[in-house]
Image: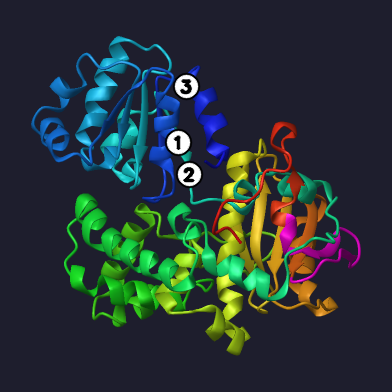
Amino acid sequence: MFERFVERRAEEALLDTPVVLIVGPRRAGKTTLVRKMGEAGRTYITLDDQTVLEAAQSDPAGFIRGLDRAIIDEIQRVPDLLLAIKKTVDEDYRPGRFLLTGSANVLTLPRIADSLAGRMETIRMLPLARAEIADRTPTFLERLFEGKLQGQRSAIVGDDLVKLVLVGGFPEAISRDSERRRQDWLRSYLTSILTRDMRDIAEVEKLTELPKFVRLLAEHSGQLVNYSQFGSGINVNHKTSQRYVGLLEQVFLIATVQPWFTNALKRIVKTPKLHFLDSGLLAGVRGLTFDRVKADRGTFGALLESFVFSEVLKLMTASDLRLTPHHFRDRDMREVDIVLERDDGTIAGIEVKASATVKAGDFAGLRALAEACGDRFAFGVVLYDSTDFVPFGDKLAAAPLSSLWDGEAPANKAGRGAPRGAV
């Protein structure tokens, strides 16, 4: 069993907060985690059980009455339970009363978000990070802001890096030995999300068109959002396309990343950017296999950028740094794939390159970002397919992509091998 970054966060939150909600994609490992935590004496209830689901739907208040130190799995299936939980928590505000999981972001419902303000802590749990798979305590984000990244003789490069990105982070995909079996699982997973989970959270007018819509989004992963272009692919308008993107975000299939900008620069693009949250799923939607990527390396760039973006989000969960991700692009097409803003306003930039060489021109976006930030700029890095760390001027460097999961193995786990199927 993998040690998950969010476990420590959840345990800490339960010590001082009445309700803790772990949200993330279905099959990311939430149920495994909370059942493990349930071994400490918590009652486990899943709303995937049809009988339990009907009981909760028919009488939410009665269902919650008498529950204490309970785990409720897949809470998005009965959002009204959260209102019943609010009532019982208001009557008894002891910490650690409810541990919830959700495969859809119920906090996008205004009455739910407002009712639990100050009573609930929400923790996002994505599929496995490479540091979790390698059983490492990651230090990338801290090293980035300190400007202390370094080379790695054991960095994963070339074909091995391609294979790693194609696998993604879902535990069940990782556990399958063959590429064909992984892609079979990922296709089945996507079908389940688009038919079952989407119905749970909203009325979708063109449910049968969603697979085509998702394929269209996959072709634009890592690019700026264009709702009109997305919608035209399934003959819906800009507003409906925007709603569909929002729903797919709600089930953690994709993410839109807001641009970083400052009033000091007038020529900045203020359009969000689109990413899939799992590179394996993105590859599956686009039909990209190892042989196809190897034959056309140009297809790897978008996969790699979404992989790095997702890894950074996962590392943020493990870090004590308070960071907000953005992207940066100006009207001169200078861009930075990922901009991280610390809560004190300090900025670090990450550019992603699929090649094994880096040139001075690859830092144009980072230099523009540094100039816009002034003293707020901490460091900028180009992550690339190599083992070497190469300085490129003040506060700029190229570093191995494997830096993302570089870290120390816990002392009591040193030497433990990777699980079957891990790359």
Residue 273 shows in this picture: no
Q: Quadrant of residue 188?
A: bottom left
Q: Residue 230 location, x and y as percent? A: 36, 77
Dot 2, crowdedness within 10 Å: few (<14), some or many (≥20)? many
The answer to which of 275 and 158 lies nearer the viewer is 158
Q: Residue at x 62, y 51 (%)?
A: 418
Label pair 3/1, CB-CB below 8 angstroms: no
Residue type for callout 2:
Met
Q: Earlier in the sequence, mark 2 or mark 1?
A: 1
- For label 3, the residue is 14
Q: Are marks 2 and 1 in contact (CB under 8 Å)?
A: yes
Q: Position of residue 39 (x, y in %)?
A: 42, 23
Magenta stretch encompasses residue 392? yes
- Residue 184 belongs to the span the image colors magenta: no
The outermost residue toward the bottom is 295
The residue that label 1 is drawn on is 33
Q: Which residue is mark 2?
A: 125
Q: Nearer the viewer, residue 373 or 54?
A: 54
Frontmost residue, 68 versus 266: 68
Residue at 26%, 75% in the rendered image: 237
The circle on residue 347 is none
Dot 3 or dot 1: first in sequence order is 3
The residue tagged with tag 3: helix, strand or loop?
Answer: helix
- The answer to whether residue 74 shows anywhere in this view is yes
Judge by depth and name the residue closer to the eye, 175 or 161. 175
User: Which range of residues does the magenta coloring cover?
Assistant: 385-403
| Dot placed on the residue nearer the N-terminal end, 2 or 3 | 3
- Compared to residue 34, the image places residue 339 above or below, namely below
- Gap between marks 3 and 1 measured at Cα: 14 Å
Quarter of the view holding residue 306: bottom right
Q: Amino acid at mark 1?
A: Leu
